[in-house]
Image (cartoon, rainbow, N blue to C red):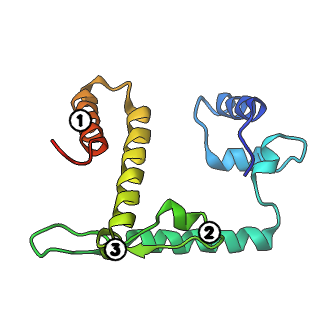
Amino acid sequence: MRKITDGMIDELERIRASHNGILYACDVVEYAIQPETELHSCFTWDDEKAASEYRLEEARRIIRIVVTVIDQDKEAIRAYVSLRADRGLEEGGYRTLVDVLGNEEMRARLLIEALDDLKTWENKYRALEELSAIFDVAEQARKIIEQGGRK
C-alpha cells in the first residue's frame, strides 16, 4: 500500500461525513472503486490476486488465535508469534513462543516489539486520563529494561 496522503485523508473525511459521521470500510471500498480517487491505489483490484491475499490473511488469523499453555498454573497464551525480522521476509512467518522465549536474541527482539506495541496503544488511548496509572507503570518498565533489567 502507498503512503497515506492528505488527499486520501480528505477523501476518507468526505466519505465519513456523507454517512452520518461514521466511516465504514464497505463505503471506502465502494468509493475507491473509482480510478480517479486517490484511495483507488490503496486496493488490489485484480480479483485473483486479492483473493489470494485474503486467504493469506485468513491463514494469519488462524495462526494468531492458536493458544498454548506453557505452565500448568498459568492461562493460555498465543502459541505462535511473528517477529518483525520474520515479517520482513517475502512470505513472513511465525515462530513458537516457546522457541522465541528460549533464545536470548529473539526474546530481546520480542521484548522491544512488545514495548513498541505498548507505545502504540498508549498513543491511541493517551486522552483517557483513567489510564494514566498504566502509562506510568509502562514508562517505569521501559526505564528498567533500558537499564538492562535492573531495578
Q: What amino acid is labelled 1 in the image?
A: Gln
Under tag 2, what secondary structure? Answer: loop
Q: Name the residue under label 2.
A: 89
* Distance from the alpha carbon under mark 2 to that under mark 3: 21 Å
Q: Name the residue under label 3.
A: 79
**Which one is earlier in the sequence, the residue at label 2 or at label 3?**
3
For the point 89% across and 47% down, which residue is it? 35
Tell me the number on the disc at residue 140. 1
Q: What amino acid is labelled 2 in the image?
A: Leu
For this orientation, the residue located farthest to the right is 36
Residues 10 and 112: in front is 112
Disc 3 crowd, CA 10 A, few/some/many (<14, 14-19, 20+): some
Locate residue 110, reporting x and y percent: 38, 59
For the point 34% across and 76% down, which residue is it? 99
Tell me the number on the disc at residue 29. none
Locate residue 42, reporting x and y percent: 75, 50
Apparent side of residue 66 relative to residue 148 in the rendered image (left or right): right
* Distance from the alpha carbon under mark 2 to that under mark 1: 33 Å
